[in-house]
Image: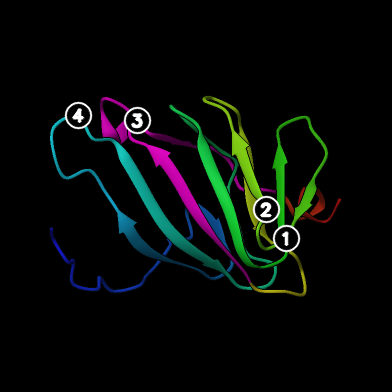
Amino acid sequence: MDIDQRKPTTKNPPEQFTGDVWLDPIAFPRESGQQMVVAKVRFAPGARTAWHSHARGQTLHITQGVAWVQSRGGAKVEAYPGQTLYCPPGEEHWHGASTDSFMEHLAMLDNADDPATTTTWLEHVAEEEYLA
């Protein structure tokens, strides 16, 4: 058994996020054949990802606050602690906090064969899209 040392919280980059978003890594591939990545991600009110997709999909489990999540072309949904959402491979989506609540979720995904292609980042979510 390995017990990991706590890794420092990092602030996510403004090229991919609007507002203040912090990430704590939880799990990562350790041995050949493993691809799972898990992180705790915390969003300040109004903060959100840019549009993006994942080569092998992504699961989000809300742990605190109010989450807003939207797939391209779909309706924005509101999710609460204890709810889990799944975005299939290649589905463009964004997720973040509502305007008046911090939000925290566990983000779970599998790396692509080339980890650099695991997530495809797209344009920022316009304020009108976020508030719609």
The crowding category of the residue bearing disc 4, from other C-alpha atoms within 10 Å (few below 14, some 14 to 19, many at least 20), is few
The kind of residue tagged 2 is Gln
Pointer 2: what residue? Answer: 83
Circles 1 and 3: CB distance less than 8 Å? Answer: no
* CA–CA distance in space, label 2 to label 1: 6 Å
Q: Is residue 100 magenta?
A: no
The kind of residue tagged 4 is Gly
Pointer 1: what residue? Answer: 80
Disc sitting over residue 117 in the figure:
3
Using the image as rendered, state which of residue 79 and residue 95 is in the foreground.
79
Q: Secondary structure at mark 4?
A: loop
Q: Earlier in the sequence, mark 4 or mark 3?
A: 4
Q: Which residues are magenta?
A: 103-125
Camera-near label (4 vs 3) is: 4
**What residue do we see at 82% from left, 51% from top?**
128
The kind of residue tagged 1 is Tyr
Circles 2 and 1: CB distance less than 8 Å? Answer: yes
Tell me the quarter of the picture where residue 2 sits: bottom left
* CA–CA distance in space, label 3 to label 2: 27 Å
Name the outermost residue toward the front. 1
Using the image as rendered, state which of residue 12 and residue 107 is in the foreground.
107
**What residue do we see at 24% from left, 73% from top?**
6
Q: Earlier in the sequence, mark 4 or mark 2?
A: 4
Q: Is residue 107 magenta?
A: yes
The image shows residue 23 at horizontal and vertical percentages of 41, 64
